[in-house]
Structures are given as C-alpha cells and as structure tokens.
Amino acid sequence: MMRQVRPQFDRRGFTLVEVLVVIGLIAFLLSITIGTLRNAIGIARQRQTEATILKIHGLLQQRVEAFDRATDKLNLNAPKQKLVTDFNQNYGASYYLDYTNDSRLIDALTRKQLFQSRFPQTFAERNISASSTLPPASPHNAKTQSSALLYWILTSSEIFGVSPVDDSEFSATEVQDTDGDGLKEFVDGWGRPLRFYRWPTMLFRPGNGTIQSGALVPGNPTTWDNTRSYANAIWSGLPSIASNGFDPLIIDPDDPAAQMYLASTKDSTGKVLPLLQYLFSTPSTYHAFLVVSAGPDGILGLGEPYDYDGSNDPNQTPPLTATRPTFGIPAVTPPALGTAQGRLAAPDPTYASASIQNHPINDNLSNRKR
C-alpha cells in the first residue's frame, strides 16, 4: 500500500524585526499626517485672524476718516477753552505750558482729546466719552477691555454720522465673551481677545530697559536707537529714513508742527513732556491705530492696553478713573519719561534682551502687517 505524503506548509510568522519596521513606518506616516494636519489648522487660524482684523480695520478706518472730516469743520472753541481752564486749575505755574501765543498747540491737544473720547481704549477713559452707552468700568477683566471697547466702538457708537454696525456682521468665531462679564470681545483664530491701541507711539520710541535711548528727551527730538526692528515685526511699509538722516517717524499726524514737543522745550522743570505723553501720546512720534493678535504662541510681547504705569499689573488702579472730567484735563502725576506704558504699545521690558527673531512680537498679527 502506497503511503500518502502530505504537503508541508511553512508556518513561520513575521519576525520581530519585520514587525518593528512596519510599526515604525506606520508611526512615521502618522506623524507626517498629524504634523500636516496641525500645520493646516494653524494656517487656517492665522487666515481667520487676518480676515477678522482686516474687517475691523476697514470699519475703524471709516470712523477715523469721518472724525477727521468732522473736526476739520467743527467749531472747537468750547472744548479748547475748557482744556486751557482745566490745565490752569490743575497745574497752574508748576507746569509751564506756553499756549498763549500759538493756537496750534491747543488745536493739537483738543483734537487728541476729542479722538480719545470717540475711541476709548480703557474703561478709565469712560468719563471722557460723549456717549452714555459706554459699558461700565467694572466688573471686567483688564486684559479684555480694549477688545470689548473696540467692539463697542463699532457696534454701539455713532461717530460723526457713521452708524453702528449690526451685531450680525460678525460671526461666533470673531466675537466671544471670553471672560463671562456680558461684554463681547473680538477674538483671534485661537479664541484669544485682540488688543486695540489708539496711539502706539512707544512701539516707535520704546524707552525702556536696554533701549532707554529710544525715549524722546528734551533737547533732542530725533533721539532713536535701532527700534524699527520691533515696529517692523508687526507694521509693514513704514516710511524709510531719508538720505539726509531725517526720519518721518518723528512726525505726529495730529501735531505736524511739533507744538507739543516745542512746548516742552520751554519748560525748565522737565515736567511738561512726560505729562503730555501720559495724558495723550509721545510728542513728535508717528502713530495710527493698531489692532493686534498675540499669534500662535499667545504671548503678546507688548505692554497691555490698560497699562498706565509700566507694571503690566492687571490690578493696577488707573489714575484717571475718578479724576478725569468730561472733555477736561485731569490732575495726575505722570510716571517718569521713558516708563514703558503699555497703553502706548511699548515693547514688553521682560523681553528687552531678546533678539527680534526670538521676540514674542515676531509672530504677532496686526492690521498693519501685510
């Protein structure tokens, strides 16, 4: 009888090396996929932020232009007289301000005061607003107030004939109440509140930490250091320095004749220059409104819009809260010249020693960055 030979099958499985190779390939492909997905999400958030900021910029610019047209035509004698009266009452002879022979100084200060009233940046300025609809100063998170006020400016305030925008113009991804206080804020693609700076003059003249020489000082209105790198990080297309060394950034659009600075040069006490910077903006310095997102890392790299004393402490008590009358000059004691006031967009002194490539401001997004 013939024996039946059964075929032999090779039952050998995968070796450990082969299994590890396959797992490694899967992990590699998965990491590429996750990285690509994260990158796509990051780009989408950036594009969303840029679109929101661009929309805000257009609406805000429309109101600024309406303000410019109106103030060129208005009779401002009453607010001018009140400004002079308040200044005399609160400061008298201790602060020498020569406005008697040059109305251009009063024109510049009055214009700034009116602009401040129509475009408030902090709740400490609520008493100077011409509108009774401005939200109450408290309770509120200090870090979100400039964003909340920016939303209020566009949706609840009429500015010289430009009507408020309807709430429906903004989506749920553009507007949120991040601190739960009942006031909406504009947010970026990462869900963080945007910041609004009315006069970001300290972005151009920081005057803090290792860049103290960037501060405007009496007797030298063109004192600068290499601070354009900070401004260029979030502000595209700044005018270049002329071949003769003249820097267009020393021109204040509200005071092109530099009356605020010239007034300070006539003051032997050295008090007027820091006072004018504290009440308004850095004299002889370029500015335009700035809307900023902290970008992907969430670190602003600038002083906060609520910061008056350079501490960036959200619990600081703004000195203007109780003292500023409607369209008047309050009695205040300004910080020393060169103090990094966040409300003027001074670079955060914490990062003064960082190179611009490693500075948090580098990945910020703004309405001035293209």
Image (cartoon, helix red, strand yellow):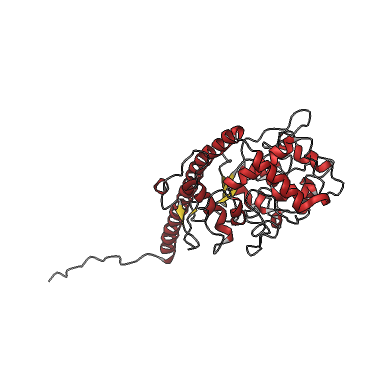
Q: Is residue 219 left or right of residue 120?
A: right
Establish if 176 lies above or below 110: below
Q: Is residue 367 left or right of residue 283?
A: left
Please state, as top left, top right, bottom left or bottom right, where the C terminus lies in the image. Answer: top right
Q: Residue at x 75, y 42 (%)?
A: 226
Q: Residue at x 67, y 36 (%)?
A: 253
Q: Is residue 207 visible?
A: no
Looking at the picture, tell me which residue is in the foreground, 248 or 127.
127
Residue 106 image offset from top left, x and y in percent: 72, 39
Looking at the picture, tell me which residue is in the foreground, 191 or 179.
179
Looking at the picture, tell me which residue is in the foreground, 90 or 70.
90
Please state, as top left, top right, bottom left or bottom right, where the N terminus lies in the image. Answer: bottom left
Q: Is residue 101 visible?
A: yes
Residue 350 image offset from top left, x and y in percent: 70, 58
Establish if 239 lies above or below 355: above
Please identify the residue farthest to the left as the structure is shown.
1
The tally of labels here is 0
Residue 40 image offset from top left, x and y in percent: 45, 49
The quarter of the displayed image where residue 331 is located: bottom right
Q: Is residue 304 left or right of residue 169?
A: right
Looking at the picture, tell me which residue is in the foreground, 26 or 332.
332
Q: Residue at x 50, y 41 (%)?
A: 59
The quarter of the displayed image where residue 67 is located: top right
Residue 176 image offset from top left, x and y in percent: 46, 56
Please identify the residue farthest to the top as the structure is shown.
243
